[in-house]
Amino acid sequence: MKRYFIAIAVAACFLPLSVVALQQEAFSLRVVATGLQNPWEIVWGPDDQIWVTERVGKRVTRVNPADGTKTVAITISEVFQNHGQDGLLGMALHPGLLKSPGTNYVYLFYTYDADPGPELNRRGKVRRYTYDPGAHTLGSPVDLIANLPAGTDHVSGRLAFGPDQKLYLTIGDQGSNFLQNYCNLNRAQELPSLEEVRQQDWTKYQGKMLRINLDGSIPADNPTLDGVPSHIYTYGHRNAQGLAFGAGGKLYASEHGPNSDDELNLIEAGKNYGWPYVAGYLDDKAYVYANWSRSTREPCSSLPFSATVIPPSVPRQKESAWRHPDFRPPLRTFFTVADGYDFQGQGSATIAPGGLETYTAKDGIPGWADSVLVLSLSKGVIYRVKLNADGRSADGEPKPYFKSTNRYRDITIGRNSKVIYFATDNSGNSTDASGRTVRTLENPGAILEFSYTGVAGKSN
Ligand SMILES: [Ca+2]
Ligand SMILES: [Ca+2]
Ligand SMILES: [Ca+2]
Ligand SMILES: [Ca+2]
């Protein structure tokens, strides 16, 4: 077992952290399993196995944390996967799994081809499976809601099971107004009409957080937005890939920003999280909404996309030109930079947040109770954000842990809350110890275990 002491002064590569934190906690690292095909969601199960969705592998796999033994619960041939963000994504276990009769349920979100012919019509669905504890397999599929938006970017697809017995699902803005989808209108602020909901036309569910009954229907107590009840719980989201409930049933989500302003949000019914009018705080810093689809004089399709240079024919709107009574700013950004920040020279001021978990154990790692752990894909660290007592604001700066040259995709905490597991991507960009961007990953397609071993240094 490799000793892995986290007692590092944080390097300057994590700019623009204003406070340099000195971590005291020590952890030992153990590689639990390798050879997974893009593990995307990991959940500690009631059987003390780590349940894994493999995005590219299209499988639900149970991994024995003691020896890494893998048992495939199901391979889903209907999953369609051909780019970096689609495939088998979110998973939530019914809290009654292996505990109460009639609740051996596992909920999955994945992308599929809704066109039976040769064309591709990529959509997303939430499907429920029943677990057979004797055979250790998943069967009896029931589609709860299908035909959800799913494109070639910003699919999101994180699922959580609420204390209110509802399913929560993130659906991204599908990369609209960005990169290869730059001429698509961003619909994160658009809300469906009564007729669209009646027709089960879920187009406007792009850039939303959904709250779904366990049979797929619309909860009677969901917010009514613009006079229309729907599955939409919150809106104005870009790409929320981390989602977890914390103390008091509060719901937290991480969200990818554009070139700056990755976010940690507290999710509350009916609120508007600002995208694409606002990135991070409503502060007019380093972000302006440029609506490529509304380019006048020169049609969007004739313009080359740039994240930093906006052609004059593309209308732009400052954050402060937009106001909304239900706007909710993030609890914390990673990171906000000032106007004039040199994105081309210095690169994006982002961490690319993957999964997220709340840390609630009072008898766990000292000082960690009431924290949120936000995973970074591109920095190879996990940021711990301490919350204030009411869970409604962040206390101090995010602290990085577990530095490695990996892309941390998802997290689960063991039955022993001093043991934390991470799933890693198989490929992509990370950051090495010197702060350089690299493409060679230390532990691709793996599950890593970090066990708290005590305090390495003296607090200053
Ligand atoms: Ca997880
Ligand atoms: Ca087809
Ligand atoms: Ca936001
Ligand atoms: Ca801003």
Image: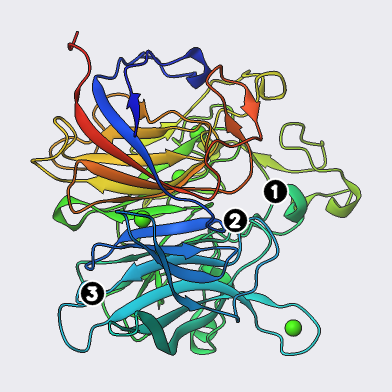
Q: Residue at x 63, y 18 (%)?
A: 340
**Tag shown at residue 154:** 2
Disc 3 residue type (three-letter):
Gln
Q: Is 277 on the left or on the right of 140, as rendered?
A: right
> In the picture, residue 128 is in which quadrant?
bottom left
Label 2 SS: loop
Alpha-carbon span between mark 3 and mark 2: 27 Å
Q: Position of residue 233 (x, y in %)?
A: 37, 66
Alpha-carbon span between mark 1 and mark 2: 10 Å
Q: Nearer the viewer, mark 3 or mark 1?
A: 3
Q: Which residue is mark 3?
A: 165
Tell me if residue 328 can be seen.
no
Front in this rendered view, residue 329 or 175: 175
- The image's colouring method is rainbow
Tell me if residue 395 can be seen.
yes
Cβ of disc 3 within 8 Å of ligand 1?
no
Q: Residue at x 28, y 30 (%)?
A: 27
Which of the image's four quarters has the C terminus?
top left
Q: Which of disc 2 and disc 3 is earlier in sequence? A: 2
Q: Residue at x 26, y 38 (%)?
A: 451
Q: Which residue is mark 1?
A: 178
